[in-house]
Amino acid sequence: MAGAGWETGSALWEEAREPLTNNKIPPGALPDKWTHYKNTVPLVSPANKRKFTVIVVGTGLAGASAAATLAQLGYQVVVFTYHDSPRRAHSIAAQGGINAAKNYQNDGDSVWRLFYDTIKGGDFRAREANVYRLAEISPQIIDYCVAIGVPFAREYGGLLANRSFGGVLVQRTFYARGQTGQQLLLGAYSQLMRWVHAGQVRLYPRHEMLDVVMIDGHARGVIVRDLRTGEIRRFAAHAVILATGGYGNIYFLSTNAKMSNATAIWRAYRRGAYFGNPSFVQVHPTAIPQASHYQSKLTLMSESLRNDGRIWVPKKKGDTRPPEEIPPEERWYFLEEWYPAYGNLVPRDIGARAIKKVCDMGYGLPPTGRAVYLDLRDAVERLGRETIEARYGNLFDMYERITGERPPDVPLRIYPAVHYTMGGLWVDYELMTTIPGLYALGEANFSDHGANRLGASALMQGLSDGYFIIPYTIGAYLSQFLREPLPDTEHRAFREAEEQVRARLEKLKSVGGKTPPDEFHMRLGKILWDYVGISRNAEGLKKALSEIRALRDEFWRDVRVLGDVQDFNQELEKANRISDFLELAELMTIDALHREESCGCHFREEYQTEEGEPLRRDDLFAYVAAWEYQGEGKPPRLHKEPLEFEAVKPTVRSYK
Amino acid sequence: MRIRLRVWRQRGPDVPGKFEVYELEDVSPDWSFLEMLDVLNLRLVREGKEPIAFESDCREGICGTCGFMINGRAHGPLKGTTVCQLHMRHFSDGETITVEPFRARAFPVIRDLVVDRSALDAIMQEGGYISTNVGSAPDANSIPVSRWAASRAFDFATCIGCGACVAACPNGSASLFLGAKVSHLMLLPQGGPERKRRIRKMLIAMEALGFGGCSNTYACEAECPKEISVEAIARMYREAWRAMFSHSEE
């Protein structure tokens, strides 16, 4: 099956004949795989580690933790971030917490249960071995973070506190008020600073990676732009790690930071790294609804609020009474009604779809009809105001600053928003992309969350990849190059890559159109939200495809980029990132179109049960879609990595 | 709303800057301050004029990227709020608002409202960490930490490194920033072994990087978007005295 030409007569995609099987999953039973791997992976001696240079791009949880740990091992590490400081990465905004299978609460948790919850939460579209390893590593993450001074919440006895999150029945989430991401990131940042001070890490803030340099088929360096001066520079290494985050910002309105972008992973894709499941985008159920046309972002209200909050709409459509005047019997607690077992704690994809559904049915709150209540008043009665304020006070502050209203006296108004991309660069068990020597960590890869990520698992994955996985797996690659000197940046590959980067930036500037880059970004976001958002269908996706292509043409005819390439130039930075979004958007749409099933976040309206529940088609789509770039204007090639479930049996996900 | 903006424009650290005035009609009270600048910049680009350079990222008050002076106050008039979370409903129709970069000796201007705050990272490099390697940590529950200590440590660890305290301080001091980090780490048992070395090195670095000293004006506390208490500075000095009267090699 190849993509049918619905418009031009040419196929939208091609399909590789052979399945993609080289994922390097170690042999043995599931619980033994990682141990087996660690016991057999080639090691690099301390004397040789000194001779290797590793580039890390990005300083979020994954990048900072990887850079610090590789430096600790003795590698020479070079770190780039486009921020003014490595402490700014968007990991910092994660609110709720981090999961770990510690079973400190004695409520039946275990590595197996965390593994099972994660793979089930991902709707059986992730690799068993990767997910099991993640669960297995999780307790060590907490140990290490406590040791470096992360101030997690504690009980009166002095031991660590936990709470529960969506999609699970145990309390395994560790947290630091509503700022867990900040505290974990500052922990990783502190270690990075430690190794910068020791001279083991060279840090380049305000440097944006614009291309990967390939020599003889291996990643051997990067081209970066110094955002302060506009200077384009070459850096060589023996291996390159991309920890550059997700691409949810492609929707313009999302909970992502304004600068979050896809450029690093998109440039890697264009150099030959496969892109895994690009259409898997998580829409978070509980963000503050959009209030104005020029709104620049959506702010998340942590999922932890669903622990104590109840989601409802008035039973009467268009009821304009203030919420406190609506008696309990006239409120529709639709999540509790539809999913009695999990209630308000259903996974994010299910929650987001349910909220959209009641709003589509006409029950959304006036005036926009695009909001529902998240109400903590019952919890205040049950636990007292003090407890609720202690748990969520800073979230209430944030809500009040944005909306002018203060919970818990009034319920929060919430609506779903794009939050996280499960898709990303395809990586094998060693977190290496299909380009030898090029790794992708954290949200930048596709690996562990399948078609839907559970709450409090992103922080776990980022730190697991950076502190505990890459330090082992990179040795397997580097040990093959013990006598290889650092490549010369005068090598032809470096000169050519630099020329291409420069030409592209000059081209952006030379368009000389009338429209600011941001306008294109807003329009692209609207297309994607409407057709490649919470629910999708073939007709809409095809429409999106032609609209994206038209918008891209218009962009290259009409974008206006002021200022110079060789200068501080924020408009140029934006335009360059948006030009990559305009290409990625097409691949996302093709991926969504090709996957003729509903799984996790990917809800295809054509594939649902009579009750409106998603219909997964394991016989046809139990695989990772890994897309290969084939050149400008050519259809991408689809490689299928079959997902084989040995330890668990894919079931219909039920949270009822 | 109608707003008149006086914005500091400066091309680089060694070029003199000046105020330029922009008139805005139809400002929505629901916009954040930065969204207002976004709209102004869209207009400037359409008119072929250089947009105003300013920095921001998360726009939810946690990354610390944004920050400038609004009517002489770091992050503007609202207590405990970064510029990105400051909404136009807090200003009045017809108001003139003056916007200029954080000014401090240690923060050279890069462009317009963008300043170089890397000196804060340089302070952290001297000791804002616990030197523990990955792989050697004991079980997380093996060392109890009182709920009070963990909570107080968090209060100081919540610093976002925006530099407002430095900009607000008449001496351009980073004492609140430094004090917050030192207090966070000294309140936890894990931070104990390095406390003397940490305070010595970080204080020396702060001075060497061009930050001034503390003269107890409390302007930093008043402007800190995370409302970190000047208790951090008291704790910092206590640490310094404690270190001074200890064995110098410890």
Image (cartoon, coloured by chain):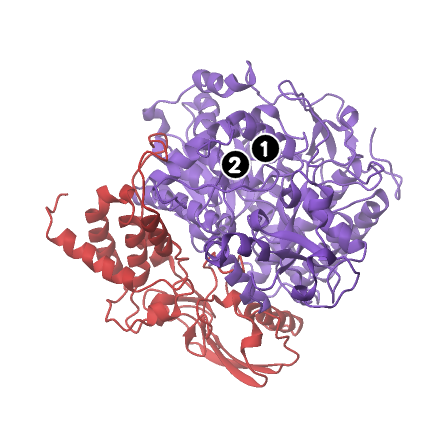
Chain colours: A purple, B red
Vertically, is B231 above or below B133? below
Estimate the x, y position of residue A19 in percent, counting from the top left: 71, 22
The image position of residue A338, as x and y in percent, is 73, 43
> Is residue B140 shown left or right of residue B247?
right
Q: Residue B164: in sight, yes or no?
A: yes
In the depicted structure, whether residue B85 falls above or below residue B198: below
Q: In which quarter of the image is the C terminus of chain A?
A: top right
| Tag 2: amino acid | Gln
In the rendered structure, the answer to whether residue B87 lies left or right of residue B160 reads: right
First of labels 2, 1 by sequence position: 1
- Circle 1 residues within 10 Å: few <14, some 14–19, many ≥20: many
Q: Which residue, given by chain and number where applicable, does mark 2 sit on?
A: A461
Looking at the image, the residue that sits furthest to the top is A28
What element does badge 1 sit on? loop
In front here: A109 or B227?
A: A109
Which quadrant is the N terminus of chain A positioned in? top right
The image quarter in which residue A156 lies = top left
Q: Where is residue A393 in the image (x, y as percent from the top left)?
A: 48, 58
The subunit letter for the residue under badge 1 reads A
The residue that mark 1 highlights is A448
Graded by Cα atoms within 10 Å as few (under 14), some (14 to 19) or many (20 or more), the crowding at tag 2 reads many
Q: Where does residue A185 sit, x and y in percent of width and height?
A: 44, 46
Query: Which sits in the foreground, B132 or B17?
Result: B132
Compare residues A640 and B197 and report the one nearer the observer.
B197
User: What is the CA distance from the residue labelled 2 to the residue labelled 1?
Assistant: 8 Å
Q: Residues at badges 2 and 1 in contact (C-beta under 8 Å)?
A: yes
- What residue type is disc 1 on? Asp
Q: Residue furthest toward the bottom?
A: B94
The front one of A264 and B250 is B250
**Residue A429 in sight in this render:** no
Task: Tell me which residue sits at (64%, 22%) in the image.
Answer: A648
